[in-house]
Amino acid sequence: MNAEIRPMRTPAEQGLSGELKNLPLTGDARVRALREAAAQAFNDNGLPHRRVEEWKYTDLRTLMREALPISSPAQSAQVEAHARLLIDTGARRLVVANGALVPELSDLADLEPGLSIAPLGTALAAGGDLVARLGTLEPGRYDAALALNTALAADGVVIAVAAGAVIERPVHVAHVFSGKAAASFARNLVVLGEGAGLTYAESFEGPEGVAYQVNSATEFVVADEASLDVVRMQEDGASALHLSTLLFEVGKGVKLNAFGFASGAAVARTSLYARLDGADSAVAFNGAILLKDRQHADSTLFVDHRTTGCESRELFKHVLDDSSRGVFQGKIVVRQPAQKTDGRMMSRALLLGDDAEMDNKPELEIFADDVACGHGATCGAIDDDLLFYLRARGIPLKEAQSLLVQAFVGEAIETVANDELRDALVARAEAWLKARA
Amino acid sequence: MPAVQETVEQVRSIDVDQYKYGFFTDIESEKAPKGLDEDTVRFISAKKGEPEWLLEWRLDAFRRWQTMQEPKWARVDYPPIPYQELYYYSAPKQKAAKSIDEIDPEILATYEKLGIPLRERDALLGIESTGGEGSGKARVAVDAVFDSVSVATTFKEELAKAGVIFMPISEAVREHPELVRKYLGSVVPVTDNFFATLNSAVFSDGSFVYVPKGVRCPMELSTYFRINERNTGQFERTLIIADEGSYVSYLEGCTAPMRDENQLHAAVVELVALADAEIKYSTVQNWYPGDSEGKGGIFNFVTKRGDCRGDRSKISWTQVETGSAITWKYPSCILRGDESQGEFYSIAISNGRQQVDSGTKMIHLGKNTSSRIISKGIAAGRSDNTYRGLVSAHRKATGARNFTNCDSLLIGDQCGAHTVPYIESKNATAHFEHEATTSKISEDQLFYCQQRGLDPEEATALIVNGFVKDVLQQLPMEFAVEAQKLISVSLEGSVG
């Protein structure tokens, strides 16, 4: 508010600017220009701090103390030992280790008709219409995490589903980090043709004691009448810094259902940008975030209604133990042409630890008059009456708490359509509660 | 023919130029030289015959203000304010009036036209009383502020009998320096924000209220602010102190002439509630909103804050915002005392090209504090209406409770309604609930009313009144009636 502050560059910013001098060489002139523009934007703006409204509660300038060197390729054996998330779900698993797709660990055989999968590096080298979509979903404003990803991510996965093809078996991209503390960048592109269908799962994991940094971005281009389910599980190691960006471009008549589960990383930030360009689509973005110790997790959403008759639903549940801190920022924008929009956003937090903190900022920005939009936010401790009810029936305190927390996060997890993935999420939540008790 | 007459009225009402307080009173006034520097601050201080400490306080604020930048985070867009082109002090040229009969008849006429009785006799008889119905019973003591000075304060003697001090702040500085010095700037610090600091440097007049221990103020207190002179800013400062166990209800009203250029109003209001005290502060803000093209109107940058300093104290803000080209206003409560309570009830209506960015802050510091926010925003025409609010619980705010409800109504497809709440809880036992909705007037409701013979405009007014009922109920009787009328006037021309 006072005098303009032009902050000194932090060691992390200096380190990152150093990395940005050697941009990856993959991609054509357009991709090269994107990378250069992103690098320039970072050099101009640096890491976000608390005066940057979108990062108000996640002051990356303070939280990111140093820039780590970009990770070298991981060893397959190590990766195999680490990759444990969502393995029994029957999904087609693609392993991205330290930011690069590892073909020998990935299930690339017998692809269903209409499904194509390629490493981003290879796809960029080959060029073509598909990779021409890369970077086209980026929001018009500066986002430090995304800029770094655009500039530095050399690999990831490109998945395309041809028009009309409905892929029954979920595709699971397992991001695994292994080795010494380093930074890894991965960029994925998922393109669904008209009327296509896909369940896309994404997981993140790595060693507990290593302070590594993960920066992932995934762009989803969803054409008219397509149907996309997204399930994410963020279980990065307890010392890790996790930054991820999800970008959606939604056509008309689309069914989109995205769910994110997170209980990992020391500091995590997930930004989600959804642009609803086509009429009469129904989208849902839900999440369950379970934190303990001094973990910090920030979920920030921008849902941009640009045309008529779309429905959006957001439900986020935070369970905060010890001194953890949950952040939810959700913004529904309804532009003037987006009449008949129906938007509902809900954020609920349960504070278990005395020193836990929840920051909620649900926003509505509405320029169309014929709409029904609303948001709600609550936070508080477990209802004493409910606890009493259970304890009066002989259930010990911890167990009673667990039951109530399970029911609380269950409401969000229930929104996942795929049975195996949902069961895996429920099991993960139960394991978290068990570890607590 | 009545039909023709109706058509004419209909056409006229499509403009937002329905502002009925837009007249100008032609009286001679004395102004400070144009612009703002240390000499202006000294000039104002000298005019008021202020003690040295206050001048120093002002100068300190002015020096700090020069290093500050105007805040840009609000969702309002306005041309740069030419701070050096304004007059920071303007007073009607006359000797200080000892009694009502010595006041310039022009000024008296102005207030009469505004419906504010300055003659106690009239007020007692209930002639032209503020409300209409119910007048004669309810008496209201009025402090009338005209540009930079207070021209009259009614019922002073009667209030003094109860021990209540109600006078212009410039007078309070002379007569009760110990109280002013103790509390001035204790709620809104000098450097709180750009506009509050500017106010601290150049504030001219405003009301001072002190309600002693255990006293229930015998009547409603009110201040009526009138900007009259061209190119002047109004910088009033109000300080209300409710000592232990006391109660006071305070009303504030404001109007200004219609002018093509914008005028600045940057006020600071500080409330202090000690243990078991209660302050109820109601505002009907009806500054000139500018014409339908957004030309002219008041820039209203106001800092209002209440400090529930004592245990079990209570501060309640109620506001009806219909005027101003730009509204930047966040009446807040600091809930410091244990079991203290804060309330915020607001109706903000914007039409034409008005921009409203308003809301509240409820800062829970003490144990078992509770707060309640009910905000109703109505946007019509090409206006933008933003609710921006903060609810926070400090680590030690065990058992804090908040309930927030903010609803927005859109009338027409050229306006915008926005909600930006910040809800920060650092205590597990704090319990916060927030809900917000945005919608338009339902076609079913309109159809129902029209079917029963109401025209669309009447139907809209009826539905809007139902929408804002929660807040109107919080207003004192006289104000509720006025506010209701104001709402229908503000929305005129927004349908069809």
Image: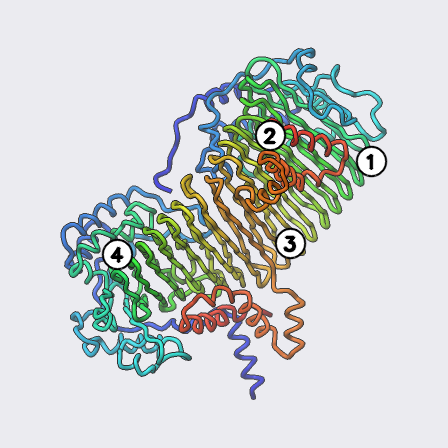
Q: Nearer the viewer, residue A106 or B480?
A: B480
Q: Which amino acid type corresponds to the residue marked 4 in the rendered image?
A: Phe
- Judging from the image, mark 3 belongs to the subunit labelled A
Determine contact: label 2, label 4, CB under 8 Å: no
Nearest to the eye among marks 3 and 2: give it. Answer: 2
Q: Please say if A351 is above or below B232.
A: above
Q: Do labels 1 and 2 share a chain?
A: yes
Residue under label 2:
A263
Q: Residue at label 4?
A: B203
Let me know if marks 3 and 4 both belong to one chain. no
Secondary structure at numbered mark 4:
loop
The disc labelled 2 sits on which kind of residue? Ser
Q: Residue A337: which disc?
A: 3
Whole-percent x, y for residue B481 in the image: 44, 74
In the rendered image, the quadrant that contains the N terminus of chain A is: top left
Q: Name the residue beneath numbered marker 1.
A: A166
Mark 2 and mark 4: Cα distance apart in space: 53 Å
Q: Which of marks 3 and 1 is nearer the N terminus?
A: 1
Dot 3 falls on a residue whose secondary structure is loop
Which of label 3 and label 4 is nearer to you? 4
User: Element under label 2?
Assistant: loop
Q: Distance between the residues labelled 4 and 1?
A: 70 Å
Quarter of the figure with residue B136: bottom left
Q: Chain for mark 4?
A: B
Q: Which chain carries label 2?
A: A
- Residue A407 falls in image quadrant: top right
| Mark pair 3, 4: CA separation | 46 Å
Q: How crowded is mark 1: few (under 14 residues within 10 Å), some or many (20 or more)?
A: many
In whole angstroms, how far apart are the C-alphas of marks 1 and 2?
31 Å
